[in-house]
Image: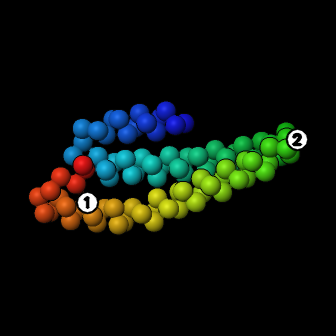
Amino acid sequence: MSMSGNMAALGHTFAEDEILKNALANFAFENYEVAAYKGLIILAQHGGYSIALDPLNASLDEEARMAAWVDQSLPALTEKFLMLKRAGENPSR
């Protein structure tokens, strides 16, 4: 999963709005990880892998916190991008 995140960031390198695209990709990726851990927890419950539940739930909590942080950060990041763009500065560097 980390590799796909890095590839998305690499694809945005030459975009004028690289920062925004990376933030949006990060938001999507974090929510994907949340969904993946939720699925893994269900599989562990039904497959009799109760030993995996604590680490999976811990990872789910961590990813959910990160997804919430990215979600909360997006408005300020977008505002800052717009402010710098309007001032004629390069907001993606």
Mark 1 — residue?
A: 81
Q: Which image quarter: residue 44?
A: top right
In the foreground, 33 or 59: 59
Q: Is residue 30 left or right of residue 89?
A: right
Of the 4 image quadrants, the one containing the N terminus is top right
How far separated are the C-alphas under marks 2 and 1?
Answer: 48 Å
Describe residue 36's horizontal placement relative to residue 17 as left or right. Answer: right
Q: Is residue 64 above or below residue 83?
A: above
Q: Quadrant of residue 13?
A: top left
**Amino acid type at image mark 1:** Phe
Q: Amino acid at mark 2?
A: Gly
Q: Is residue 37 above or below residue 82?
A: above
Circle 2 packing at 10 Å, graded few (<14), some (14-19), many (20+), is: few
Residue extending furthest toward the left = 88
Q: Which mark is residue 55?
A: none
Determine the residue located farthest toward the right in the rendered image: 48
Q: Position of residue 58 (x, y in %)?
A: 71, 53
Of the pair 89 and 45, the residue shown nearer to us = 89
Q: Is residue 55 visible?
A: yes
For the question of whether residue 46 can be seen, the reply is no
Residue 53 picture location, percent across and down:
79, 48
Residue 48, label in figure = 2
Number of marks: 2
N-term-proximal mark, 2 vs 1: 2
Residue 64, percent from left and from top: 60, 57
- Residue plotted at (73% across, 47% down): 56
Q: Secondary structure at mark 2?
A: loop
Q: Position of residue 77 (x, y in %)?
A: 33, 61
